[in-house]
């Protein structure tokens, strides 16, 4: 029997399946949205055209193209646009950046979000928002930004480039690994995280062999859904906080930063939660979590060092000083991309 625990789950509706993009208009109607603002990442142009046509008189306007980490000026422009078109709903098609922009609108206006994720970042399942201003990223949790409906359609992800796919999977795996040791971690988040990790690792290996394998792409989206669910309830810890500091301050690519940092954080932290560590190792088919993650990212050709992402040694040292907690060793290793062999067990 599990030990006593407290768990909070979040209310959202998930519509999952290849071809489900065509259900977006009906889902918007079900939400009672009268005027939907469409936000689409660059690659989702065609999908946005389809949704725009299907929304008919409920289509209120469109924002094409988004930027990573939701810069304040981009958020402000989107809020202005939402006010101008009197939107009471936002349909966001894209990765964490498109969904993040929808969340920025929902934070200050009464709009309902329908998210159509096309990466594996998992933001669509969380009430977490983020905004970047003057080189520093602010994040917060607010139920108003949680998408009411999430439509997962693997067909939209078939052309996601392998490098973006792999980095995005690393981001989702970071949610899974961190979800087992945060203060709010519990048997429900742990089980969700373990199954998410299994789907993500298996799906990634299949997609590396056959990038347009629709079933494997569906497996990855399912993993992303579970990973986001685990993140939403377990919250964030040292890993996400460190990645947000690095991403916001040095403008590093979000998902790749997770890939470089995660094996080193797992090496340091996972031994504190031996049972969850073993479960994650079984899901990832490895006998050491940190090494298994590192080797999976290597196999997928995701950069495993912050140095490769353009961070200087001095910046890594500066980040370690700015971080509230001792991350010297983690950042030294993540900067150099040191193999995690010899991890404390
Ligand atoms: N709030 C949360 O819970 C949460 C969770 C994870 C990530 N995030 C945020 O999300 C952002 C990163 O999201 P991301 O990693 O999804 O990156 P992203 O949304 O910036 O997308 C990465 C790139 O992939 C392209 N792309 C997306 N889908 C595609 C597709 N299907 N086919 C081809 N190209 C496609 C995009 O145009 C972009 O160039 C960060 O700002 C991060 O902080 C938030």
Image: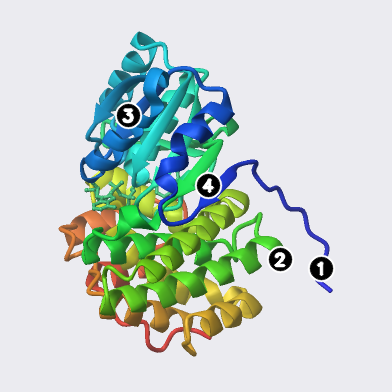
Read off the residue under disc 4.
125
Tell me how far mark 1 sits from mark 4, CA to CA. 26 Å
Is label 1's Cβ within 8 Å of ligand 1?
no
- Near mark 4 (Cα within 10 A), the count class, few <14, some 14-19 or many ≥20, is many
Is label 1 in contact with label 2 (beta carbons under 8 Å)? yes
Q: Earlier in the sequence, mark 1 or mark 4?
A: 1
Q: In the picture shown, does residue 139 fall above or below 320?
A: above
- In the image, 263 versus 142, the foreground residue is 142
Q: Earlier in the sequence, mark 3 or mark 1?
A: 1
Q: Earlier in the sequence, mark 3 or mark 2?
A: 3
Q: For residue 3, which numbered disc appears in the image?
A: 1
- In the image, 28 versus 267, the foreground residue is 28
Q: Earlier in the sequence, mark 1 or mark 2?
A: 1
- Near mark 1 (Cα within 10 A), the count class, few <14, some 14-19 or many ≥20, is few
Residue visible at 35% across and 78% down in the picture = 206
Read off the residue under disc 2.
187
Mark 1: which secondary structure?
loop
Tell me how far mark 1 sits from mark 2, CA to CA. 8 Å
Which x, y percent locates residue 298?
27, 78
Residue 139 seen in the figure = no
Which x, y percent locates residue 150?
50, 44
Is label 4's Cβ within 8 Å of ligand 1?
yes
Image-based side of 97 in relation to 240, left or right: left
Tell me how far mark 3 sits from mark 1, CA to CA. 51 Å
């Amino acid at each position: 029997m599990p030990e006593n625990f407290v768990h909070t789950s979040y209310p959202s509706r998930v519509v999952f399946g290849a071809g489900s993009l065509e259900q977006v208009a009906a889902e918007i109607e079900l939400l009672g949205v009268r005027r939907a603002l469409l936000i689409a990442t660059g690659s989702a142009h065609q999908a946005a055209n389809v949704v725009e046509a299907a929304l008919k008189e409920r289509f209120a306007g469109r924002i094409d193209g988004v930027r990573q980490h939701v810069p304040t000026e981009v958020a402000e422009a989107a809020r202005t646009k939402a006010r101008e078109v009197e939107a009471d709903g936002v349909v966001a098609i894209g990765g964490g950046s498109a969904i993040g922009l929808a969340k920025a609108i929902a934070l200050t206006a009464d709009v309902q979000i329908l998210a159509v994720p096309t990466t594996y970042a998992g933001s669509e399942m969380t009430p977490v928002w983020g905004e970047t201003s003057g080189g520093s990223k602010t994040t917060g949790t607010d139920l108003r930004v949680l998408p009411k409906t999430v439509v997962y359609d693997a067909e939209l992800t078939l052309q996601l480039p392998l490098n973006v796919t792999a980095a995005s999977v690393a981001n989702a795996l970071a949610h899974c690994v961190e979800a087992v040791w945060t203060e709010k971690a519990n048997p429900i988040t742990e089980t969700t995280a373990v199954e998410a990790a299994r789907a993500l690792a298996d799906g990634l290996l299949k997609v590396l062999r056959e990038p347009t394998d629709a079933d494997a792409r569906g497996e990855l989206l399912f993993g992303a859904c579970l990973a986001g669910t685990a993140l939403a309830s377990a919250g964030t810890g040292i890993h996400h906080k460190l990645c947000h500091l690095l991403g916001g301050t040095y403008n590093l690519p979000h998902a790749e930063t997770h890939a470089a940092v995660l094996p080193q954080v797992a090496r340091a932290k996972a031994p504190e939660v031996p049972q969850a560590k073993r479960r994650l190792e079984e899901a990832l088919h490895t006998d050491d979590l940190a090494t298994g993650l590192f080797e999976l990212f290597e196999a997928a050709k995701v950069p495993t060092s912050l140095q490769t992402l353009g961070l200087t040694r001095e910046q890594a040292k500066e980040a370690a000083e700015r971080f509230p907690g001792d991350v010297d060793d983690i950042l030294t290793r993540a900067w150099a991309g040191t193999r995690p062999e010899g991890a404390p067990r």
